[in-house]
Image (cartoon, rainbow, N blue to C red):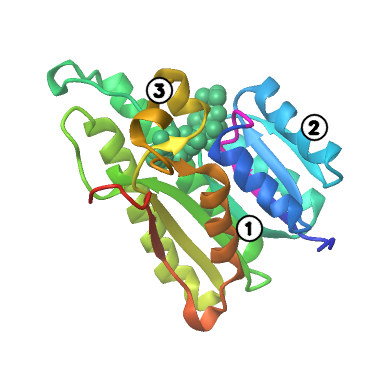
Amino acid sequence: MSRNESVLVVGVGASRGLGAAIARRFASGGYAVVVAGRTAEKVEKVAAEISSAGASAVAVVGDASAEADAERFVDAAEAAGPLAVAVHNAGTNRRDPFLELAAEHFTQLWREHCLGGFLVGRAAVRRMIHRGAGSILFTGATGSLRGRAQFAAFAAAKAGLRAVAQSMAREFGPKGIHVANVIIDGGIEGDRLLARFPDATERRGPDGLLRIDAIAESFWQLHAQHRSAWTHELDLRPWAEPF
Ligand SMILES: NC(=O)c1ccc[n+]([C@@H]2O[C@H](COP(=O)([O-])OP(=O)(O)OC[C@H]3O[C@@H](n4cnc5c(N)ncnc54)[C@H](OP(=O)(O)O)[C@@H]3O)[C@@H](O)[C@H]2O)c1
């Protein structure tokens, strides 16, 4: 079913990654999808895969933490149809013993997660507010809630993004815009994790890592919720994950 509306997914990389899976889920639901990321080959490949499956997808390259790029991503989505959903999924992670954590790396993660989320969210709200409808969905992590040893930069960035999401939800929920933060509390079975730890799937046991399509389904369901029963924060973890 074609819906004549667009969905923007910012932070798309490998085909076997969360951003790509979210884009595929909304494309299969009939939306024109704009996939945005900072590596041209990756976003172009994901868009081509979606298009060859018969759905509509356009790739846009840029850095979500640059104001002009965040605006350009949203413009590209609006060109494909009124923006129904904006997802901010971008950002990397790094481990640094605290005394070796460089200000540059601390700032880099804050820019990717927190500043980028703010810029994409603000650009999206500016389009949605006139229609009084739309969903803005952020990808969080365990670090959104807890600063693990040696992950100060990541935790600060994700906690900041969570605060941005809360503030937006309180301001724009009553104006018809659904803002939600999805806390991914576990490892994602995707290229990012498996490139570093190729035996992670085996080590975690059956369904011990979050499947990208299963997470994407939750993003889809968040957008589908009736406004009389909206979720603001959703935590997702594998069945056997201790927490
Ligand atoms: N992987 C995990 O185990 C895990 C666990 C919990 C939460 N998360 C969260 O899940 C999200 C990512 O999912 P994923 O790990 O499967 O990766 P992914 O969705 O496959 O890829 C995320 C993409 O974001 C892009 N990106 C980073 N900074 C950007 C920026 N400033 N502007 C535009 N694009 C940017 C990266 O580009 P490049 O390819 O150029 O780097 C990367 O390709 C992140 O929010 C992450 O914190 C991941």
Identify which residue is drawn at 84% across, 63% down: 1
Q: Which range is magenta?
A: 8-15
Q: Residues within 10 Å of mark 1 (few under 14, many from 20)?
A: many
Q: Report the amino acid beneath label 1.
A: Val
Question: Would you name the residue on which mark 2 appears?
Answer: 48
- Looking at the image, is mark 2 or mark 1 earlier in the sequence? 2
Give neighbour class at mark 2: few <14, some 14-19, many 20+ (Cα, 10 Å).
some
Q: Residue furthest left?
A: 99
In x, y percent, where is residue 199? Answer: 40, 22
Q: Outermost residue, bottom direction? A: 228
- The reply, left or right, for residue 200 in relation to residue 69 is left
Mark 2 in CB contact with mark 1 (< 8 angstroms): no
In the picture, the disc for residue 85 is: 1
Question: Mark 3: which amino acid?
Answer: Asp
Q: Which residue is mark 3?
A: 199
x 80%, y 49%: residue = 79
Residue 123, position in %: x, y? 59, 51
In this rendering, the answer to whether 16 lies above or below 81 is above
Magenta span: predominant SS is loop
**Inter-mark Cα distance, 3 to 2:** 29 Å
Left or right of 153? Residue 197 is right
